Image: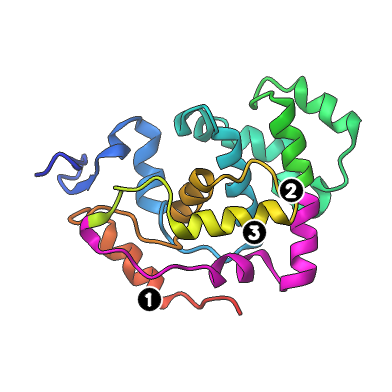
Amino acid sequence: MSERHWTGPDGAPRCRWCAGAPEFLDYHDREWGFPVADDVRLFEKICLEGFQSGLSWRTILAKRENFRAAFDGFDFRRVAGYGEAEVQGLLQDAGIVRHRGKIEATINNAARACEMVEQEGSLAAFFWRHEPEPLPAGQAQTLTWSATSEAISKTLKKRGWRFVGPTTVFAFMQAMGLINDHVEGCVVRDRVEAARKAFRRPG
């Protein structure tokens, strides 16, 4: 067993990071890396990655249901209509990360997401158009950004999105299945690869 692996409770090897907290195991096994084409889930994830900036994913994952309740399930069409009253309410919500800049960025990004749907047909169509060539399995989890995440970040910023730097975008790509970044030997890697092969890329 390499230093990049951790043996789960079922005796199977997994990416070492999922040993970092009890709640990581289910997230790693059921969500991380499986391809997503649902616009609301894509919007939620890129927003949560923005909230994570400077914090740990454990903090955000523990508060995810609170975030969903606070931001109307990350329905970006609804969030785009938030004004100062909603910002003030969110700043009083102890269940989320009360950072004005990140809250305002989420509202701004919701409006930009609405524009993107008009222009591209869906958020999924935009993001999956940028799917990179697969990395060799042995390179998994050796990067925190890539040329693709840099390109997506630049495009999003040009379109007015905020808190979408290349590291944030790379973490989003890992989680939403645009790349399979489970380490070689992880019991979930092959399952993710099968899901990616069966996945219909949005047009």
Local crowd at mark 2 within 10 Å, few (<14), some, or many (≥20)? many
Residue that carries the numbered disc 3 in the rendered image: 155
Q: Amino acid at mark 2?
A: Asn
Q: Which residue is mark 2?
A: 109
Q: Which residues are magenta?
A: 110-138
Looking at the picture, tell me which residue is in the foreground, 158 or 175: 158
Rendering coords of residue 29 (x, y %):
35, 50
Q: CA distance from mark 3 to mark 1?
A: 27 Å
Image side of residue 122 versus residue 29, left or right: right
Disc with the residue nearer the chain's start (3 vs 2): 2
Q: Residues within 10 Å of mark 3 (few under 14, many from 20)?
A: few
Q: Residue at x 46, y 47 (%)?
A: 171
Q: Is residue 2 above or below residue 54?
A: below
x, y (%) of residue 170?
Answer: 47, 50
Q: Nearer the viewer, mark 1 or mark 2?
A: 2
Assign a secondary structure to mark 2: helix
Left or right of 158? Residue 83 is right
Which of the image's four quarters has the C terminus?
bottom right
Q: Which residue is mark 1?
A: 197
Q: Is residue 41 visible?
A: no
The quadrant holding residue 8 is top left
Q: Earlier in the sequence, mark 3 or mark 1?
A: 3
Q: Quadrant of residue 98?
A: top right
Q: Secondary structure at mark 3?
A: helix
Looking at the image, which is closer to me, 94 or 101?
101
> Any magenta on residue 155?
no
Q: Residue at x 51, y 27 (%)?
A: 55
